[in-house]
Image (tube, helix red, strand yellow):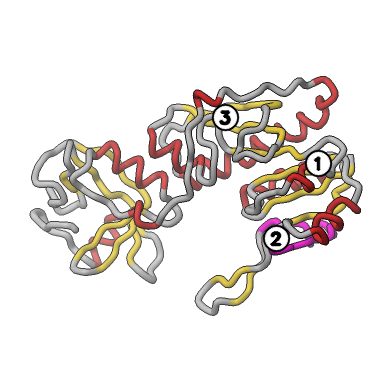
């Protein structure tokens, strides 16, 4: 098939690679423009752009698809289908209608649950036992289109980073299979009454409140690892927590119960296992404590 691929972050790269390796013709890749990143704030191409250039695929990075010129350029590619994975721009109706078979989206949840920008993080925060991938026929609404295929995987104790990598691979294979079976598939409408929404993560949500139950904070740690990183303050310094486990113990919320970073919570306690100081690499708790001891009775903010 003649495919326009539309995606930006690392999550989208396996799908682009799988489609190319399945023998489809990728007539163009649409991705977000390069953004400043790193200490030098140099412009960095998206992971999808890097992959496309390695494969010799033409890359387009329009700031918007709302103007007639951008829409005409899109339609002139005469795609059979557009495949979208975390692209980052809303597709106007003219773009949705241009491909012969429309636009298919790789969405990282079991729709209609967790429509929106941050389905993986919201699923972990909610304590869902299972999440997955849905291949959806796109329409004007926010992740409301009819579904063509789904695949599931357990959440278990995975971080958002780990789950993103796993779902990216699942989504890639599911999309390849969906295109093979497309003539035989019947799209199933979503049940709007069961919908839930996954708004974009606000960095303020990453602040740990030790008055909450340890179970909820442990999910918070996993949902925000590796980015933006759940955090607390110690002696005025922000410390990120990248891994933690629920532990036995009780005391005033936010108080160290021992010398090994076991912290009392609103219910039960949390043992911090991997942390990161500002400007420093991630380290195990034991290595952190050698440089900055946290004695029993220390109060964290």
Which of the pair 255/78 is nearer the observer? 78
The tag earlier along the polypeptide, 2 or 3, is 2
Which of the 4 image quarters holds residue 33? Answer: bottom right
Residue sticking out furthest to the front:
68
- Residue 160 in percent (x, y) is at 47, 45
> Is disc 3 placed on a helix, strand or loop?
loop
Q: Mark 3 points at which residue?
A: 111
Q: Mark 1 points at which residue?
A: 97
Tag in front: 1 or 3? 1
Marks 2/3 in contact by CB < 8 Å: the verdict is no
- Residue 133 in percent (x, y) is at 61, 33
The tag earlier along the polypeptide, 1 or 3, is 1
Give how far apart the Cα atoms at labels 1 and 3 are.
22 Å
Q: Quadrant of the N terminus?
A: top right
Which of the pair 191/67 is nearer the observer? 67
Q: For the magenta stretch, what is the residue range?
A: 47-64
Q: In this view, does 90 lie above or below 23?
A: below
Residue 203 within the segment the image draws in magenta? no
The number of numbered discs placed on residues in the rendered structure image is 3
> Is disc 2 placed on a helix, strand or loop?
loop
Marks 1/3 in contact by CB < 8 Å: the verdict is no
Residue located at (81% from left, 25% from top): 181
Q: Name the residue under label 2.
A: 64
Residue located at (48% from left, 50% from top): 200
Residue located at (36% from left, 59% from top): 283
Give how far apart the Cα atoms at labels 2 and 1 are.
17 Å
The tag earlier along the polypeptide, 2 or 1, is 2
Q: In this view, does 103 lie to the left or right of 127?
A: right
- Residue 72 in percent (x, y) is at 86, 56
Residue 281 is marked as: none
């Amino acid at each position: 098939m003649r495919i326009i691929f539309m995606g930006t972050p690392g999550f989208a790269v396996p799908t682009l690679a799988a489609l190319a390796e399945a023998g489809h013709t990728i007539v163009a890749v649409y991705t977000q423009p390069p953004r400043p990143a790193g200490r030098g704030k140099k412009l960095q191409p998206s992971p999808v752009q890097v992959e496309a250039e390695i494969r010799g695929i033409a890359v387009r990075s329009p700031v918007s698809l709302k103007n007639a010129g951008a829409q005409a350029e899109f339609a002139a590619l005469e795609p059979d289908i557009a495949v979208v994975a975390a692209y980052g721009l809303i597709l106007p109706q003219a773009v949705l209608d241009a491909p012969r078979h429309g636009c298919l989206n790789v969405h990282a949840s079991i729709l209609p649950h967790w429509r929106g920008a941050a389905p993986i993080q919201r699923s972990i925060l909610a304590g869902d036992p299972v999440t997955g991938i849905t291949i959806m026929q796109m329409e004007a609404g926010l992740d409301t289109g009819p579904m063509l295929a789904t695949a599931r995987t357990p959440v278990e104790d995975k971080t958002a980073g780990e789950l993103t990598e796993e779902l990216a691979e699942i989504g890639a294979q599911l999309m390849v299979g969906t295109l093979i079976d497309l003539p035989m598939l019947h799209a199933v409408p979503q049940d709007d009454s069961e919908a839930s929404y996954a708004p974009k993560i606000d960095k303020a949500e990453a602040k740990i409140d030790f008055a909450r139950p340890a179970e909820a904070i442990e999910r918070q740690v996993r949902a925000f690892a590796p980015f933006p990183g759940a955090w607390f303050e110690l002696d005025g310094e922000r410390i990120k927590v990248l891994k933690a486990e629920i532990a036995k113990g009780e005391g005033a919320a936010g108080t160290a119960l021992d010398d090994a970073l076991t912290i009392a919570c609103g219910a039960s306690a949390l043992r911090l296992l991997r942390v990161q100081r500002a400007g420093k690499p991630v380290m195990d708790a034991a290595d952190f404590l050698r440089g900055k001891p946290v004695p029993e009775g220390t109060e964290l903010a």
